Image (cartoon, grey):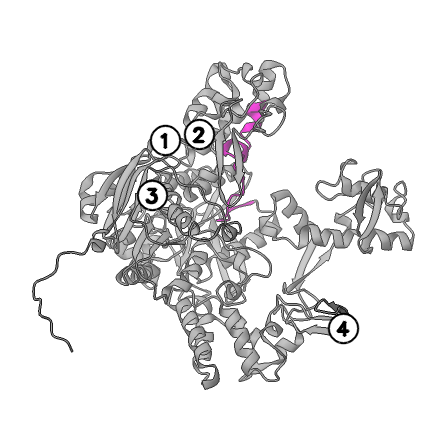
Amino acid sequence: MAEKTDTQSPAPHAADSHDLIRVHGARENNLKDISIEIPKRRLTVFTGVSGSGKSSLVFNTIAAESQRLINETYSTFVQGFMPTLARPEVDVLDGLTTAIIVDQQRMGADPRSTVGTATDANAMLRILFSRLGQPHIGPPGAYAFNVPSVRASGAITVERGAKKAVKATFTRTGGMCTRCEGRGTVSDIDLTQLYDDSKSIAEGAFTIPGWKSDSFWTVRTYAESGFLDPDKPIREFTEREMQDFLHRQPTKVKVEGVNLTYEGLIPKIQKSFLSKDKEAMQPHIRAFVERAVTFTTCPECDGTRLSEGARSSKIKRISIADACAMQISDLAEWVRGLKEPSVAPLLAALQQTLDSFVEIGLGYLALDRPSGTLSGGEAQRVKMIRHLGSSLTDVTYVFDEPTSGLHPHDIQRMNNLLLRLRDKGNTVLVVEHKPEMIAIADHVVDLGPGAGTAGGTVCFEGTVEGLRAGGTVTGRHLDDRAALKKTVRTPTGALEIRGATTHNLRGVDVDIPLGVLVVVTGVAGSGKSSLVHGSLCRQTGAAGAGVVSVDQSAIRGSRRSNPATYTGLLDPIRKAFARANGVKPALFSANSEGACPTCNGAGVIYTDLAMMAGVASPCEECEGKRFQASVLDHHFGGRDISEVLAMSVSEAEEFFGSDQARTPAAHAVLGRLADVGLGYLSLGQPLTTLSGGERQRLKLATHMAEKGGVYVLDEPTTGLHLADVEQLLGLLDRLVDSGKSVIVVEHHQAVMAHADWIIDLGPGAGHDGGEIVFEGTPADLVAARSTLTGEHLAAYVGA
């Protein structure tokens, strides 16, 4: 080895001076020209009340600009196939590194998307079975439930030198079950829900949503196709007419000189409704599908989605269907037992992926679990799996509430994973509210002081100790601990669940008290959602007990949607304006007759620039107000419609409660929005700009209007700041005191401590869970300390 002769330490290299991510003049959404410096290769936690601007800073500014800059390194041809990203509203962004975003966006809920297909585990299993499976049935595609078998033969012309026709045959063996087409379920359609057979098509026989209008092209295609008599009641159709009506293959027809395609009603319904994800449908369409269609497990493949050939090929008596149905922790052990040198690299990669599932706390899942059924927290952890074993360093990892959906017992494991990513030399940015995660931060950025227009400034930057002493809202609430209730309410009755076996539940019998606040808890994967949504909602829904379920599914709405349109608040406002001015209500809708003709009621003009980010410029005609000038001449209570939509919920509540503009229907909706802590939101703010916590509370406010006796809430503290949790507890108390029964699936210890009754599931996850391990009051749970939840709750309340 060469000897070192220079013993003096060299001067710092210029490349080592870039240890900070500098943000100057950030103005995205509600950020107020803020400037901060974030240390690299450290764990930085961003805190602040819901709506204070955390996501705007971390995701919409830092991560978005990093991704935009990376996309710009590709050729314009490649950029044309990538999502176009606008440059964030910020003066200077310096010191950025490659950002990997691990957010809580739900995974695609396509019927054929599973945990295995979303994580490459299925791809590796297919290769494994194509190499080792006996009998051998074909290449990896023969084990894929998304690949149909194809056979073709005929003449093809090869254009090479002298053209000549060549006879060719082509076959491809796929693993898709032919009966259910890889979905695992088959559907039977109840024809009585599609049409009234006592009426003719001309009389409006169709009862399908949106099919009643004579001007609707589909209805006219049936009426004027020539295959059917539109004036004859459907029950009087001949056998031939009925065949054409229900089952005819797509056929070209001419209706009023327009070429259209006629198709039998059943294939038409299957394409229009059944090929789409039920959860992504509008509520009235989903209600129709649930009414008209019954989904049953495919009898041919028994729900495995696979063809008979794929199911017959086995390794050590296990088929690929058996492997995908196993709990992942068990599958990892099975793979570990396979010793086959010819596929050693593949086995090692598969082993690492499966072990990552177990390590991250998702060992209770199975690879055939539909990805659309994962919670936001589970989806986020599934996305983390591909990054755990990565050898990349100097990367910026951006996480959105990684503790979401985690029991206190699992949070320590998540903390260790984040620290491991940091210790490999990466920058870790986390948006989080939980004190357990804030405590491990190297650096804390606290935004606020309030939400919406009252937020968007940096209240504190520094260490966790500095935050505690800083006097900000987060600092003051960081050590808050809810006390156990001294007295609990007395139940007025009980909902009986008997023999619940949904997913991993083991014939659970439980009585859920009514008229009180019930919290269902347990480690992730212990069976909480299966009990509450799978058994309780289905059982009581069938019995008509009036269950209002507020889950964590995303709010669907475009940039034209806002709190006023989503909650139905705009309807009474439009009617009030119309009455006061003697005109039509449609004039006061920016999506209807009152819309500015230049921007079509959007308020901005969007210019598409192909592979470059589109430009949105304010409409010069309406100056961003979205309405025609003539509409703004109409006033109600001294305000025009654009001024009303610019009000905050609190202002509007006062306005519509005053004598000059009293509108009880609007005031009631605004009162519910204020109750859930959204008083600062403006009525016309696009839904696309709301934070996750704001969206869930908006949904809760909407459901509070429903006439239900039992409210079921799924982790309502998700996205809520410590200070907001107190307000949520007050809202739950008001619901119970008004005579409602409230059942909450929750991990937050403050909600557990505030409960009247706790049902704890466990003891573990997956096949190690599915049992009731405790029923009783929070005080009894703390005193017994007999479960993981009891131990953590006792530590939380300092018992």
Task: Please provide percent x and percent y for residue 634.
Answer: 56, 15
Tell whether 460 sits left or right of 750: left
Q: Which numbered mark, 2 or 4, is in the foreground of this view? A: 4
**Residue, disc 3:** 721
Residue at horizontal 56 percent and vertical 83 percent from the top: 317
Mark 2–mark 4 Cα distance, whole angstroms, equals 68 Å
Mark 4–mark 3 Cα distance, whole angstroms, equals 70 Å
**Residue, disc 1:** 453
Residue at horizontal 51 percent and vertical 59 percent from the top: 530
Look at label 4 and name its amino acid: Val
Look at label 2 and name its amino acid: Ser
**Could one spot residue 307 in this view of the protein?**
yes
Residue 96 sits inside the magenta stretch: no
Marked residue nearer the N-terminal end (1 or 2)? 1
**Residue, disc 2:** 682
Marked residue nearer the N-terminal end (3 or 2)? 2
Marked residue nearer the N-terminal end (4 or 3)? 4
Give the quarter of the image for residue 27: top left
Marked residue nearer the N-terminal end (3 or 1)? 1
Asked whether 396 or 774 is in front, the reply is 396
Q: Which numbered mark, 4 or 1, is in the foreground of this view? A: 4
| Stretch in magenta | 547-574
Marked residue nearer the N-terminal end (4 or 1)? 4
Asked whether 437 or 157 is in front, the reply is 157
Mark 4–mark 1 Cα distance, whole angstroms, equals 71 Å
Task: Please provide percent x and percent y for residue 788.
Answer: 34, 62
Local SS, label 3: loop
Look at label 3 and name its amino acid: His
Local SS, label 2: loop
Mark 1–mark 2 Cα distance, whole angstroms, equals 9 Å
